[in-house]
Amino acid sequence: MSQAGADPRRRVLGQRLAAVRRRIAVACADVGRDPEEVTLVVVTKLFPASDVRLLAELGVTDVGENRDQEAREKLADPLLLELPLTRHFVGQLQTNKARSVVDYADVVHAVDRLRLVDALDRAAGLAGRRPRVLVQVRLDRTPGRGGVPAEEAADLAAAVAQRPFLELGGVMAVAPREGEPDAAFAVLREVAHGIQARYPGATWVSAGMSGDLEAAIRHGATHLRVGSAILGSRPPLR
Ligand SMILES: *Cc1c(COP(=O)(O)O)cnc(C)c1O
């Protein structure tokens, strides 16, 4: 029966969360944005359900995972039952995992091909769900990290918007590994505006991680996906 604040992990998470919230506030102030427009999605991959629980107790409303099996197990943990969390799947998604992911994910971020749109729509219909879907835009030339080229994003968004069991939320991207993220996020913002002109509800721009959240905020991000700045460095992937 630890006192509030007595658990060292809780204290560390609370401090890092506060530091990230300050970074968000400063970055928003710099460009005259209201921090309320920016949702912090804490990416908890490779960290336990107990951390997710502590984060929720510290006021986090949105959590992200990037691997189906881990997410499915963790989010079903009894520790997390009844917590009012919005659950985001932020990773690359294989088509054959669509059935699994729509069960627990309220938002699917990295949708980058028509086959995946179809699989998610079918799975959502069967599950009686209607997840929000973001079109992943590729901002660098390095293949393998997912995303559609910027020129193709509007067509894929249109395909999502036509599906009965999917809600088009907007766009998502990961900054290129090399170079300044600003130019890349500016491209993302252009793509987002083009899609919003046709689908006014598609207001979400998921961009910005621990290292580049300020740049993402400068370029209109509405959702930040932050992991290590809050949870610490991840254990190496096996
Ligand atoms: C892990 C992950 C993040 C968080 O990255 P950090 O650099 O730890 O903040 C964001 N987005 C995606 C898609 C991820 O897989």
Image: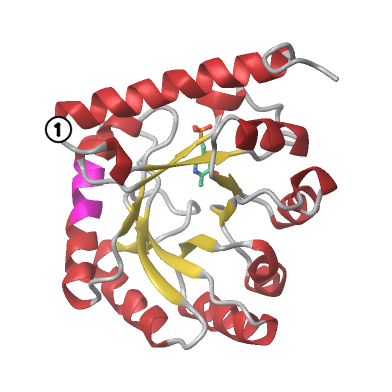
* Magenta portion: prevailing SS class: helix
**What type is the residue that disc 1 sits on?**
Val
Q: Is residue 186 magenta?
A: yes
Task: Examine the rendered structure and indicate whether residue 138 appears above or below residue 45.
Answer: below
Residue drawn at (69%, 73%), measured in percent from left and top? 96
Image location (x, y in percent) of residue 25: 29, 27
In this rendering, position of residue 148 left or right of residue 181: right
Q: Quadrant of the N terminus?
A: top right
Q: Secondary structure at mark 1?
A: loop
Residue 126 in the magenta stretch? The answer is no
How far across and how far down the image is residue 140, in percent?
33, 48
The count of marks equals 1
Identity of the residue drawn at 30% across and 67% down: 202
| Residues in magenta, as a range | 183-189
Other residues around mark 1 within 10 Å, as few (<14) / some (14–19) / many (≥20): few
Q: In what quadrant of the picture does the C terminus appear? A: top right
Question: Which residue sits at x=20%, y=77%?
Answer: 198
* Image: 91 above or below 237: below
| Occupied quadrant, residue 53 | top right
Indicate left or right for 61 with 186 as reference: right
Q: What is the quadrant of residue 213 in the picture? A: top left
Q: Position of residue 221 (x, y in %)?
A: 29, 46
Q: Residue at x 70, y 75 (%)?
A: 99
Residue tagged 1: 31
